[in-house]
Image (cartoon, grey):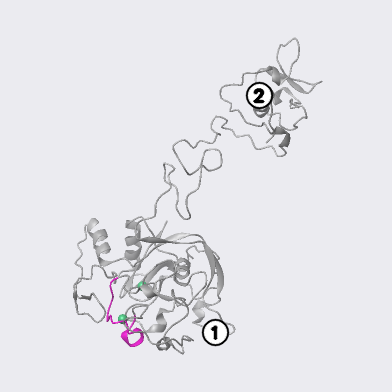
Amino acid sequence: MTHLDPARHYALTVAAVLFWASGCHRDLVSDYRFGCATDEDCILGYACDLVKRECVRKGSASPGNAKDVVTPPKDLVLIDIADVANVTDVPPVTTDLGGCKPQCAGRKCGPNGCGGVCGVCAPALPCDAAGQCKSAPPGMVLIPAGSFMMGSPQLPVPEGFDSEWPQHKVLMSAFYLDAAEVTWAEWKTHQEALGHPVTIPSDCQDTAYGTATNSCANHPVIGLTWEEARGACQWSGRRLPSEAEWEYAARSAKAYRFPWGDDCPSEFNDAAALTTCSGDAWTEITAKANCTEVDCHDGFGRTAPVRSFPLGKSAQGVYDLIGNAIEWVADPWHSNYEGAPTTGIVWNGSSADYVFRGGAANNVGWVSRAANRYRTVANYADWLGVRCAWP
Ligand SMILES: [Ca+2]
Ligand SMILES: [Ca+2]
């Protein structure tokens, strides 16, 4: 920044104000005067001297230039161009000269009235109406922005089903996802707020190989239709994740087969799914997800309390993406990824079927592979549950 003496700075500043106000900004002359062509190029009370091409006060005996005028109109804003010698690109003049300061008093984020913003929030946190950064709802974790290869490869060795092809790169914005599946207790709170009584089942196992005589309050709610799942999220100001968001959260930027990586027990192999697993069998201690006992050896015959498998959580700390309740997402079904979006948005379509992901406690191992895609009609329920995304 060039330092100027205060008097010269003030003169330049006033000149700049009138420059904006007059509309005489077609040519920025070297001595900071006004290069007008007609009276319309000058502010009210001034006319254009066609010889000097300067705006001069009407009726003045001795034509002056704008530097004679030392009091700018009240509704103008001083524009600091102390470094005006370095100005090469003249910014546009706002029509709201009184508002472009920017206006950030009492607020930290959001539009400032000048076409800019007062500040930005942390990733995925929007501004509220008062210009304050919102906080994420409790129980959610940040899934950072990035990109990943959605779907499964066909080369050099094909994997998965043709519904997972072609594998394609998807650019993801940051978002928040529930760390746990929506529980029976949360479903009851939601439904009873709407006047619908809910009786939480009392035949759930609390622990691996435990007896099934306990409350299911902390287990994932299952038996939800797509509309019920969507409603459960909307009621708490959240939403269903898109299919891309779900898969990105479950596979990370590395596009692993599972939230914990590529490793899977050989019990997960299936010829039809082209699954290739070579890991050791799980035990009650080492299990990373809740699927059928014959494949997962996890000790739960039906659902488990949410967050029961810390070894199977994602890099961001999302539990039970694989197994337990199988999870609805927002997208209607598409039979493959031809023409799929390249960002994480919901892929709208005309199918009456919707997508669900991740396998359930009653599914065999290979069903739980994170790229596997499933569909059913919206009013089907069975083992279907949900987790929500935000904002
Ligand atoms: Ca199980
Ligand atoms: Ca699940």
User: Residue drawn at (35%, 60%), measured in percent from left and top?
Assistant: 139
Does residue 111 lie above or below 286 as drawn?
above
Q: Is residue 185 left or right of residue 275?
A: left
Residue under circle 1? 158
Q: Secondary structure at mark 2?
A: helix
Q: Nearer the viewer, residue 371 or 277?
A: 277
Residue 134 on the magenta span: no
Q: Which residue is pictured at 68% across the width and 25% down the height?
A: 5
**Side (left or right) of 244 relative to 154:** left
In the image, farthest residue toward the bottom = 271
Numbered-mark total: 2
* Up-down relation of residue 194 to residue 370 (above or below): above
Residue at label 2? Answer: 6
The one of 224 and 293 positioned closer to us in this rendering = 293
**In the displayed structure image, the side of residue 233 where residue 153 appears, left or right:** right
Secondary structure under the numbered disc 1 in the rendered image: loop
- Amino acid type of disc 1? Pro
